[in-house]
Image (spheres, rainbow, N blue to C red):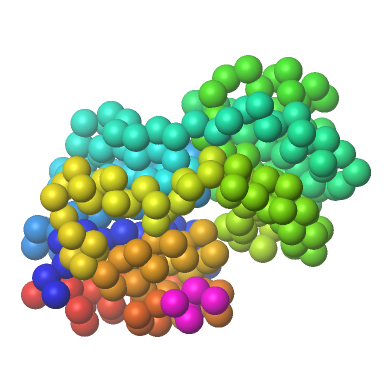
Amino acid sequence: MDFKLIALDIDGTLLNSNKELTPHTRYALIEAQRQGKRIIIASGRHPVGVVPLANDLMLGRYGGFIMAFGGGKIIDCTTGKTVVSKLFPKEYLPDIVGVLKDSNITVMVHDERKIFANNRVNDYTYVERDILKMDMIAVDDFISAVNFDINKILLAGEPDELDKYQEILSKRYDGLLDVYKSAPYFLEIMPFGVSKGSMLPLLLEKLGVNKDELIAFGDNYNDMTMIGYAGFGVAMSNGEEEVKKIANYVCESNDDDGIAKTLEKFVLK
């Protein structure tokens, strides 16, 4: 298959364990674009945490896209314009905070410049801040502070406690919201039906590309819909076992330039 689009998760996939883009992987992705391929960076991150990588990979020059918030916002890197934005239904926010009131889980949302968190600080609260390099504000009256549109809710906490509340929240909002892990210590709550895999068809239709011409790379649970949708879904060897089971191919790890080696094997001429 002559692949035309390459979709990439960031953490655990595009970046190594030190959160670095290696020269080998960067070269392979730029070479793919020189050969006419287009790149989609598909991440649960806020756009602020994706734009520097998109710039480093020259997506603006080659017609690439950012798919931020797990598919909730799609940005054309050439124009800087938002193509699609799916907003979170904020009417559920008070109830979600109420369900979590006896937990030690941090509830976080993002505006354009800052992260807003409730006052339940734990060891994982500031991981998101450090990844995005955004200011974080912890507030007592969280509900009143969120007076702006949001694309998702992010929960941070101990993996075992998140597993417990993932089950509770998934049952409570079944058919209303989507709840899934993006890291052992992160739980994402998304508008119903919004995922990397569900939003990619909108972009492919716009570009006139068939899903069989899409190769997608990921490592975690929030990548499963994307890997399952793509014509050729690739799981990183460092990824979750459930992700590997649905992939067409398991490549080398993010610390062993798995993306670059796969592109050299299947994509680059």
Residue 181 image point, x, y percent:
62, 58
Indicate whether residue 161 is drawn in magenta.
no
Determine the residue positioned at 65% across, 50% down.
174
Residue 113 seen in the current view = no
Compare residues 248 and 113 and report the one nearer the observer.
248
Q: Residue furthest right?
A: 102
Which of the 4 quarters of the picture holds residue 158? bottom right
Secondary structure of the magenta portion, mostly? Answer: helix
Rendered image quadrant of residue 126: top right
Q: Position of residue 6 (x, y in %)?
A: 26, 61
Question: In the picture shown, does residue 70 fall above or below 242?
Answer: above
Q: How many marks?
A: 0
Bounds of the magenta segment: 242-246
Residue 71, above or below 88: below
Relative image position of residue 16 (x, y in whole percent):
46, 67
226 relative to 269 in the view: left or right = right
Q: What's the residue at 87%, 47% (across, down)?
A: 103
The quadrant in which the N terminus is found is: bottom left
Work out which quarter of the rendered image holds the C terminus and state it: bottom left
| Residue name at image x 48 percent, y 81 percent | 245
Q: Is residue 191 left or right of residue 248?
A: right
Q: Quadrant of residue 184?
A: bottom right
Residue 99 visible (yes or no): yes
Image side of residue 265 versus residue 199, left or right: left
Q: Is residue 174 left or right of residue 267?
A: right
**Residue at x-position 68% and y-position 53%:** 170
Find residue 17 and report its horizontal and vertical position in percent. 52, 67
